[in-house]
Image: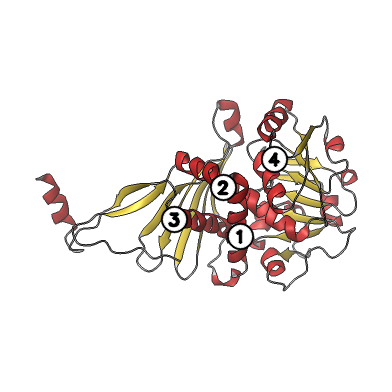
Amino acid sequence: MTYAKKPAPGHLAMVPFVSVADMMDLVNTRGIETVLREIAAHIEADFKRWPEFDKTPRVAAHSPEGVIELMPTADAQNYGFKYVNGHPKNMKEGFQTVTAFGVLSSVANGYPILLSEMTVLTALRTAATSALVGRYLAPENAATMAIIGNGAQCEFQALAFKALVGIKAVRLFDIDRAASEKAARNLAGSGLDVVICDSGQEVVQGAEIITTCTADKQNATILTDNMVGAGVHINAIGGDCPGKTELHRDVLLRSDIFVEYPPQTWIEGEIQQLDKTHPLTELWQVMTGQAKGRTDARQITLFDSVGFAIEDFSALRYVHDCVQQGAAHVELDMLADPDDPRDLFGMVKRAEA
């Protein structure tokens, strides 16, 4: 953990900023599969000390167009938050559906120690979390994953499951075939066998892992009961706000359900469809050995993923570690820090001269 250090008198308090260009440089320099594995390791380490964190469901401002959210958490050393939006209509207008930035600060004095883009980083941490959970819940020796919804998250998910779970083949389906063709082009040369399918029923054939990641902000039935065979692991990442789901309720009733933080998942996840007495397992308990993950070859496991602030904290902690090791960034003069903490006005007056 890192504390913000008081600069020497007369020196500005500078904050490292990782831009989109810097994040792309980090990914391309280290290699995307390496970055995914390293972020997953940070997430796993933080999940294993889950009780140490302050936790709250994200603070959301909903509108007919989408949602804007703040996702805060803290441990004894550092505080982190992410600002993120979700606007499904944006794609038709030439904008990203999801954009984000984040801050990591020192609890000791409140000074930020990192400001980072998190549009790319959120895609990386979401994929890293999915594949990390897959290591605990997917069938042994799973080789094929189906991805329903081939938008911005698709390729990250495929490469994360390759890097962490060892899948060898990806089957793609999207109602917009151009999205599947885009994903197939981007995954060319990745070492994955990529097949584009014409329907949801076709895409799940032979897949041990099914990932759903659609963007529309509505209750939808992307995955029906007849599409899910015994022994499958479902990675449901598209349902992430009130009123948005992807799975038929019958699929939930057949599955053992694993979640990040129940108070948030009940609001935003697939389990919106269930009574709150329905049994759930928290992932941190699986990772610490306090609860069981997959126990049977015929068991259907479901990761009802909505994304939680500790995952963003872990990702920011990872990027901060990389910056400390020399990763690309710029220093921002964003903290007023006069030599005499009582003389903020005097600092302004002296700048006039």
Image spot of residue 198 (x, y percent): 82, 29
Spatial CA distance of label 2 from label 1 is: 16 Å
Looking at the image, is mark 4 or mark 2 nearer the viewer? Answer: 2
Query: Circle 1 is placed at which residue position?
Result: 41
**In percent of the image, x 63 and y 58: which residue is there?**
264
Looking at the image, is mark 2 or mark 3 nearer the viewer? Answer: 3
Position of the C terminus by quadrant: top left
Q: Is mark 3 on a helix, strand or loop?
A: loop
**In percent of the image, x 60 and y 50: which residue is there?**
34
Q: Are marks 1 and 4 in contact (CB under 8 Å)?
A: no
Looking at marks 4 and 3 on the same chain, the residue that comes earlier in the sequence is marked by 4
Looking at the image, is mark 1 or mark 4 nearer the viewer? Answer: 1
**In percent of the image, x 56 and y 47: which residue is there?**
122
Q: What element carries label 2?
A: helix
Query: What is the three-letter code of the residue carrying label 4?
Result: Gln
Image spot of residue 29 (x, y percent): 52, 44
